Image (tube, rainbow, N blue to C red):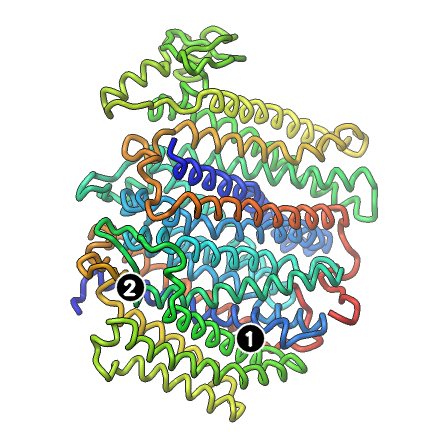
Amino acid sequence: MDLAVALARWQFAVTTVYHFFFVPITLGLSVLLAIMQTAYYRTNNEMYKKMVKFWGKLFLINFAIGVATGIVQEFQFGMNWSEYSRMVGDIFGAPLAIEALLAFFMESTFLGIWVFGWDKLPKGVHLASIWLVAIGSNLSALWILIANSFMQQPVGYVIRNGRAEMTNFWAVVFNPHIFEQWPHVFSASVTMAGFLVMGVSAYHLRRKGKYHEIFKTSFKYAAIYASIGTILVIVNGHGQAQHMVKVQPMKMAAAEALWETEAPAGESMFAIVDRANHRNFVDIKVPGVLSLLAHNNFTDPVRGINDIQAEYEQKYGPGDYIPPITLSYWLFRIMVGLGFLMVLIALYALYLTIKDKVDHNEWFLRLLIPSIFLPTIAISAGWIFTEIARQPWAVFGVLKVSDGVSLAVSPAELWISLIGYILIYGVLIVADWQLMVKYAKKGIEDEESAAHQPAPAHA
Amino acid sequence: MAFDLNTLWFVLIGVLFTGYFVLEGFDFGVGILLPFVAKEDEDRRMVINSIGPFWDGNEVWILTGGGAIFAAFPNWYATMFSGFYIALFLMLFGLIIRAVAFEYRSKSIEPSWRKTWDWVIFTGSFIPALLWGVALANILKGVPIDETMTYTGGFFNLLNIYALLGGLASLTVFTTHGGIFLALKTSGTVRDNAIAAIKKVGPIATVMVLLFAIGGYLFTNAFASLGVNPGAIPILALLSLLSVGWLINNDRFGWGFIMSAVTILLSTASVFMALYPNVMVSSLNPEWNLTIYNASSSPYTLTVMSWEALIFVPIVLIYQGWTYYTFRERLTKETELEY
């Protein structure tokens, strides 16, 4: 493959995946913070205020790196994918502009108000500000997903003047795909925040410190939150997968490494892919289950990769329409497998909370700490899967990835920016990690936080 | 000047860039002055906290500006962003590290941690403040763009004299602007140092802006096509900059800030007016210029976006304005600091 295209793809993948390490925490935790602060507003119980301020501190550390890694994204389409921008910008640019105008302004402005306004604003106004941060950040997710949905399932456009031109804005906004995709991403974010709060709470619950009650309450909130999130993410994910069978059959065939159309189709549990020969060396399947998942019955056929490839050659001309199968197959499995593992963990946490047995379960509390990263791995696997398995298309059926790359950017310049981003982001992640761990462990403070402590006399 | 959707969007993007430079301009200036007007840790925190509630909302103006260029003029977005690749990468580097620095800087009491992040704030403010002027100058001057709307110039092409003049102009103007903001928002040693800094940098900014304006005649067609009298707006821009100097020397910092903002507004307007109806000028062949017509989206998209802007821009102005009102108090040694 062309070096320039490969480097541009790697860079987009690296920068986007890095960005999306942090964004789900913002999306899910902002809502949870707003819920906690609503409890404070209603009860006037100082415990809730301490709770909000503690989780809020972790939220802010994470939000900063979310913003920093997000700035690049707005520019990257033009910088690295100029021909893509020309081809679909008439449609794709609008959701991005709206995302900034509606959502980014809202979340950024009201976050400033929330951070600096604790003692300045009436309590109701201050509460409204954190709700607007939660709404703003989730609206931004909605609009960028509307843009991504256009890539997955192009609607509301016509090819004219050598490019895609928008014919129906509402069709673009209410793309059937977004109804599956946004709830799935939102529930994943709820899951992420739930596991983060459960894990950090678990750390403190084991230590039975001064603010044990606050962490028990936080745990309770998080267990409910994570339970809702994990159940919904699976339900929504299933809906999205069924939708994809109709709209991007090659993607789902790749997820299953299903080379030949089958009726009924079996669900693959383990496969070793033989890409060169368009088959699998090994494929252990459960009969009929794939038909069930795809079509809600045990009989209907599920189309195989080879069949779809032949159809696409007819439709789009000669070429390789098959995405990376091994990666698609295993990433999909990782995402789904972790999803089911997480729902078990969340429901068990909920069970312990209801039975008031959280304190007594040492091994489970210890398990919850590394479990903080399960949602991150699942989310990353899911995103890499869905983008990779759409290849070779950037916009499905309209524009291939290789045709979208910037012509003005040389491989040398690409190496500079790719390595540059990896280094910068690497340093920032280390700083983020250090601060998150430090403040997570520090727990709730009696007096003012370290941010209020002066450094020794000389700067 | 025909008043059509394309022109409307050209103006709107100009408005977004103007808003960005007026607002983020003082963020940059504050960040640049940080190591110089504040030596003690508490003073440095005062400086950072002066823009604490505002900087993130201010930065969104450029995200909106970039998004608006993408939506309204996809060819401009594509040609400029891919063409100015390394320059934009450097600017992003500055913006990225600065964004994290504000939040992370005071979260450890280690002096070495704080000092490092202070210099990150400086660097992350300095680079964009310089590069924006470089970018605007190059857009005005014209860069090698071929018949496929592709930039063919490379990075070093962008570092010509006119561009460097533009960069130094934006750098010094933003620094002065930030200094005046500090004079309004801080107290004590920081304020005194900020005022001293304005009095040093302000005159330099005036000279740089003059050189840039003269350079416009030497290096671009834009001003030449306007004649010896470039028109009211550019002249008013220069006059308002001079008024800033007079106001500062008479301790009128509130008016000084207003006139500094007006200077930035009129200067940005001058650039956009000189550019119109082009959006990118090709130094190879004027037939290969990108214009508000050949670079734009479809009329349908422009119409849809116009409704969006009409509804949401006033709302944003109201609540951002409210933020500035809410946090209008001057910071003192007693003020509780969040950053």
Q: Is residue A133 above or below residue B136?
A: above
Q: Which corner quadrant holds the N terminus of chain A? A: top left
Could you tell me the amino acid type at mark 1?
Arg
Q: Name the side, left or right, on which B123 lies relative to B171.
A: right
Q: Which residue is mark 1?
A: B328
Measured as percent of width and height from the top left, residue B218 is found at: 29, 76
Q: Residue at x 40, y 59 (%)?
A: B156
Q: Which residue is mark 2?
A: B142
Residue nearest the observer in this picture, B86 or A176: B86
Could you tell me the amino acid type at mark 2?
Gly
Q: Is residue B176 above or below residue B8?
A: below
The mark lying in front, picked from 1 and 2, is 2
The earlier-in-sequence mark between 1 and 2 is 2
Q: Chain of mark 2?
A: B
Q: Name the side, left or right, on which A85 lies relative to A184.
A: left
Per the image, label 1 sits on a secondary structure element best described as: loop
Q: Name the side, left or right, on which A248 lies relative to B122.
A: left
Measured as percent of width and height from the top left, residue A80 is found at: 39, 45
- Spatial distance from mark 1 to mark 2, Cα to Cα? 42 Å
Measured as percent of width and height from the top left, residue A128 is found at: 54, 57
Q: Chain of mark 1?
A: B
The image quadrant that residue A412 belongs to is top left
Per the image, label 2 sits on a secondary structure element best described as: loop
Q: Name the side, left or right, on which B179 lies relative to A211.
A: left
The label on residue B279 is none
Measured as percent of width and height from the top left, residue A205 is found at: 78, 39
